[in-house]
Image (cartoon, rainbow, N blue to C red):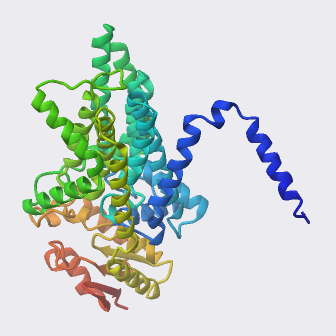
Amino acid sequence: MPTDSTTPTRLAALYALYARLPERVRTGYWTRVVPVLTVLAVATHIPSFLRPVWSPDEGYLATQARMLADGGVLYDTVVDRKPPLLPWLYEACFSVFGSLSLWPLRTLAIVAHLATAVLLASIARGRWGNRAGAAAGGLYLLLSIGLSPEDTQAATFEVFMLPAMVAAFRYAERRRWLAAGIAVALCSLTKQTGGAVLLPVLWMLFQDARRRGVRWRPALLKIGFGFAVPIALVAAILTKPKGFLFWVVTGSGDYASLGGGAWWQMLGRALGNSAILAAAGLGFLLPLGRRLWLRYRAGRDLPSIGTSRGSTGDLWIWLVSSVVAVATGFHFFGHYYLQLMPPLVLLGVGAVSVSAISWRPVMAYSLVASFAFWVLAVAWPGEQLNQTTAVATAVAARSTPKDTVLVWGMHPELYWLSDRKPVTRYLTAGFLTNFSGGKGSADVGEQYSVADAWQTFDQEINAKGLPEIVVDDSGNAPYQPTLVPTIENLLDSHYDVVGAFGDTMVYRLRK
C-alpha cells in the first residue's frame, strides 16, 4: 500500500516534468488562455446535464442512433432532413457508452463550444492583439447560453456546426484555401445552412487576390476541391446517393417554404429571439452600434487599430451570410441564432478594441447576463418534460421491448425515453402531413406529405404489423387524427384508449 510519503514524491515528479517544458509552453499565451476558457465552457453548460433531454431534436437524434445501431440504413429506413455527421456521432457515442443517457453528447457539445471559443480567440488575437483574443473566446462562451435553455443547452446541430464554420473562416484568413474548403464541407455535412460560411471565404479569396495582384482561379479550385470531395465521399460511398440527394438537398422544399401562414407568429419569433440575443450581447453590441454611428456621421471608414486588414468587411459578409442562413425556411427557431454568435462577437470585440472603451463594463455586463441565463436554465419549467416522461413510462409499462410504437406528434423523444422501437421511419407527423413547428395550418394534410410517404408507411405497417401502442400527441394541431383520415381510421378500427396525460392520449392495440 502507498504511504503518505509518496504524495510529495509524485508532486515533485510532476513539477520536474512541468519544469522541463519549454518556457514558451509554460508561460505562453495559449497555456494561460485555454484553461480559463475550458473552465468557462464547463461552467456555462453545467445545466445541460440536469435534464435527460432538452429538445425534440435531441430525441430525434437519439432515436435515429438506436435505429442505425439496429441495422437501419440512413436515408433509406432511417430518414431526416439533416446531413449525416451528427446522427453518426450519436450512434458512435451510443456504441461506446450505451444509449440510456445523452451525457457523452453533452460533454462533446462543451468541447465543440470550447473549440469555437479558441478559434475565435485566434482570429481576434491576430487582428487586435492578445487581450482581444482572450475577450473574444470568453465573450462567445458567455453569449453561447444567451437564448432559451432549450436552444443553448441541447447537443444539437448548430452547436457541432460552429467549430467547422469558424475554422473555415480562420483558414481563409491564412490563405489555406484547401483546408477552408474542407471545413466548409464538414460544416455543411453537419447542417446545410452551415455552408453559408462559403460566402465570406470566397469574398476573402477575391479580396486577397485583388490586393496582392495574383490569380484567384488556383485558390478557387482548391476551395472547390476541398468542399466537393468530402460531400461526394459521404453521398456516393457512405450513404445512398439518391437518398442523400433527396433528404439533404431536394426534399425539403415544402418544409423550408413561405407556405403555412402564421406570418405574425413567424415575425414574432424572429423579433423575439433577436431581442433575446441582443440583450445577452448588449455589453459588446452597444460599442459596436456606437462605432457604426460614428462612422455614419464621419461619412468614412474609421481607422482600425491592431489589425493588418484595415477593415472588418469580411466579418460583415460573414454576419450577413449567417443572417440569411437563419432566415432560411422562415422558422426562426432560437437554436438557429447560434450561427450569428461568432461574427457578432468578433465585430463587437473589434469595436471595443479600436475605441477608447474599457473592457471592464463589457465583461461585467456579459458576466451578469450569462449568469441570468444560467439561472434560467437551472430553474427552467419542467411541466412538458414531466408529461413526456409520464407518457413514456406508460408506453413502456403497456408494451414489451419487442413491440413497436407509433408516436403521432412532434415529440420523437418519446421513442427514446420509453425504449421502444418506432413502427415507421417517419419519427414525426411532419413527414406525413408537411406540418412544421412555428407555421400555420395551411398546406398541412395527407396530400402534402413527403413524396410516397403514405405508401411507405403502409408497407412498414404490413411488414411489421400494427404497433402495440399509438401515442396521439397532436393536441389541437392541424394534423390531429380527426383531420387525417388514415390515422383516424387506424385508431377507430384497431385501438382503445388506455391512458390520458394532459392533451396526450395513449392507445393500445385491441386484442
Quarter of the image holding residue 506? Answer: bottom left
Q: Position of residue 369 (x, y in %)?
A: 33, 59
Residue at image point 55% right, 35% down: 29
Q: Is residue 51 above or below residue 87?
A: below
Instruction: State the image coordinates of residue 59 (x, y, percent, origin top left).
Output: 40, 66
Which residue is outermost to the top?
A: 213
197 shown above or below 57: above
Total numbered circles: 0
Quarter where residue 469 is shown = bottom left
Q: Residue at horizontal 14%, vertical 37%?
A: 293
The residue nearer to you, when weighing 323 against 349, is 349
Looking at the rendered image, the quarter that the N terminus falls into is bottom right
Judge by depth and name the residue closer to the eye, 407 or 356: 356
Looking at the figure, which quarter contains the C terminus? bottom left
Q: Specify whether 254 is left or right of 501.
A: left
Return the x and y of residue 80 as percentages of the image width and height.
34, 55
Q: Residue at x 48, y 54 (%)?
A: 40
| Residue 93 image point, x, y percent | 55, 57
Q: Is residue 444 above or below residue 39?
A: below
| Residue 84 can be seen, yes or no | no
Asked where in the image residue 471 lies, by quadrant, the reply is bottom left
27 or 185, nearer to the observer: 27
Left or right of residue 150, residue 174 in this image: right
Give the side of residue 258 with respect to residue 103, left or right.
left
- Whether residue 287 is visible, yes or no, is yes
